[in-house]
Image (spheres, rainbow, N blue to C red):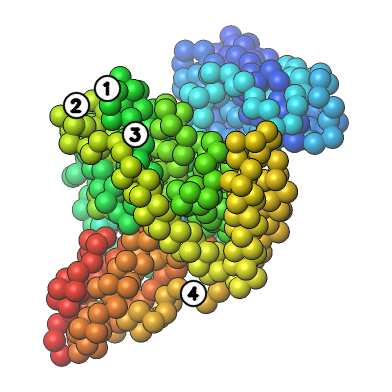
Amino acid sequence: MAAAAWLVALLMLFGFEMPSRAQQAGGTNVAVTLVPGAQQAPVGASIPLAFVMKPKPGWHGYWENPGDAGAEATISWTLPKGITASDLRYPVPERLVVSGIMNYVYEHEYALLADLKLAADVAPGTRLPIRARLDFLACTAEICVPDSAEVSTEIVAGPAGQPAAMDKRFAAFEAAMPRPIGAEGRFLVENGMVRIGVPLPASVDVEDPYFFPFDYGSLDHGAAQKVSRNGDLLIVETRAGANATGLAAVPGLLSIGEGQGLLVTAKPGPVPPAGVTADAEAPAAGAGWRVIQAALAGAILGGLLLNVMPCVFPILSLKALSLAKAGADESSARREALAYTAGVVLVCVALGGILLGLRAGGAAVGWAFQLQDPRVILILLLLVTAIALNLAGLFELPAIASGGRLAAAGGVHGAFWTGALAAFVATPCTGPFMGAALGAALVLPTAASLAIFAGLGLGLALPFLLLGFVPALRRRLPRPGAWMNRLRRILSVPMFLTALGLAWVLGRQAGVDGMALGVGAALVLGLGFWWVGVRQGGSRAWLPLAPALAAAAAAIFIVPLGVRAEVAAQGVLASEPFREASLAALRAERRPVFVYFTADWCITCKVNEKGAMASAEVARAFQARNVAVLGGDWTRGDAEIGRFLAQHGRSGVPLYLYYPPGQDAKILPQILTVGELTALGTPV
């Protein structure tokens, strides 16, 4: 294909002889500048590098698949030892039809990105010259000129682990890059046509959607694309390309708006017929903003409701103590409320940023992704154990364990870290309004996504923010007194129960050995704190804790990662493990199907499973109505489940679906009731 493209270029070059001689080659039609992401790059890490391409007016460069003409840029690196470079990454392209030939191009300034990785053995302070030769094709509507540019720059190796000071221009460069959709699509070749189904929540508006195929010949570039929506599936239908028969996959980029695109790979599979034409439901001006507003409102409301969720309750107890202590001073109460809010919001935004980054790397992860790692569960177990022992009065020092000490401390710092801890521990929960909001956040522009995660934190912090700024509410709090010590001891109970629950989750994730290791580490840590408590008031009272902390840290490194206990989806409504093929088979039998997705660390899930879903009345109703039950366990992550959740606009669990015979799924509330479940199905 590349040879053909260059042939087309040469034909155009000589076929339009006079105009071509008027142009200059050598990078003069498309100026190229090499820009490093940072002047200093930490060894053992990567930084981006940008080839900033600036076409003259009327000229353009080409995308990775140039279309029916043109050519992809090629690059030759000259790199010092210890540096490797990735393939080029291309921003979302535009369409340009010239004499009936479809071209995928850039008619404005754009940046091609590559990632430079420094080996760990490069000495910090080493100056690293970077040289590259970029060969590309620069064209107008009449002529094409093979062009090239020799560019260079220099970076300096920095200390390992030290964050790079990024060039601010790279935020815009990265924003122009397409993002992985995190779910697999399907395609079907039939009667010379290709129908591609892209999982995309129905709530996400698209503008002028178009599927850019990566591979030449999978689609007919010049054919019109008919785009429609069928529920949470966006369907692209167009004429098949010359190589469409027998394809194992159709990778491509779905453009959903100006400069916005999603990377998706479609595998062979059934695709429903076209649904509602996308053009018919094209959003009016400002509709995208309204979607963001709705998602933000849902995130704030969902965060507010998290305060009454069982997974947040132990942390609420901490804050209740803090507010009671600070109740007499209005300015202090305001500062603490702001600090608490800052802690919650920053953690939510940080978790959201990491989540978006992982998904941009192709990982099918969702909200609370970090709890799928046994090491994170063990850290939480140790942290909660330390806080519980502090509340129980075992030690009184403003002690040593980072999270627990910081959260238990008073004042602005204590409020900030209490908020941070509340947000971190709240991640296993998704309450009403949260699911759709966070699902939409994963496909919105990065800035809007982060705003929605910040809205979630604001909602979680809202009650304490109001208490800090509304004296009338604060006056309703009981006065500080001896009762606080009793309350503190009482509130240690839910913290111990939380630690017990985390030990159980650790056992589910890492097996009996992992749970024993976690409990042992908590015991050693408890002994250390006891010794600290005995010595408190003396000099260097914290010293006995050092070996206990070392032992706990060692446990984090050796906890088993590859052991998985039996899936959680057992003993609840006699369910079978979820698989899309099983669901399709049951639906083909026209059986009603109840599907639920759970995780051991999802307390909301467990409340439902021990409550409404464990009801004998529900089991009898399901049996009488022949309702099949499929349970999906997402405790350690599962790519198939992750994709399925994304197809329904969710980024985490729980998710409850009901499929009536012959109909699409109905999403059930996240808090289930017996009445709701017994109403499912039709008596047989």
Residue 533 position, x and y percent, is 58, 46
**Mark 4 → mark 3, Cα distance in angstroms:** 44 Å
Say which amino acid is labelled 1: Glu
Helix, strand or loop under label 2? helix
Residue 566 position, x and y percent, is 52, 77
Left-right relation of 600 to 572: right
Where residue 518 sits, quadrant-wise, is bottom right
Residue 547 position, x and y percent, is 73, 48
Q: Are marks 2 and 4 in contact (CB under 8 Å)?
A: no
Instruction: Give me the disc on residue 567.
Output: 4
Residue 568 position, x and y percent, is 45, 73
In terms of sequence position, does the residue under pointer 4 or pointer 3 come before the other? 3
Where residue 275 sits, quadrant-wise, is bottom left
Q: Are marks 1 and 2 in contact (CB under 8 Å)?
A: yes
Helix, strand or loop under label 4? loop
Instruction: Give me the disc on residue 471.
Output: 2
Instruction: Give me the disc on residue 325.
Output: 3
* Residue 505, placed above or below residue 437: below
Say which amino acid is labelled 4: Val
Instruction: Give me the disc on residue 330.
Output: 1
- Badge 1: residue crowd in 10 Å (few <14, some 14–19, many ≥20): some
**Which residue shows up at 27% across the image and 51% down it?**
308
Helix, strand or loop under label 1? helix
Say which amino acid is labelled 2: Pro
In the depicted view, which residue is nearer to us: 534 or 325?
534
**Which residue shows up at 36% across the image and 27% down it?**
336
From the image, which quarter does the N terminus lie in? Answer: top right
**Which residue shows up at 54% across the image and 23% down it?**
170
In the depicted view, which residue is nearer to us: 38 or 526?
526
Say which amino acid is labelled 3: Lys
**Mark 2 → mark 4, Cα distance in angstroms:** 49 Å
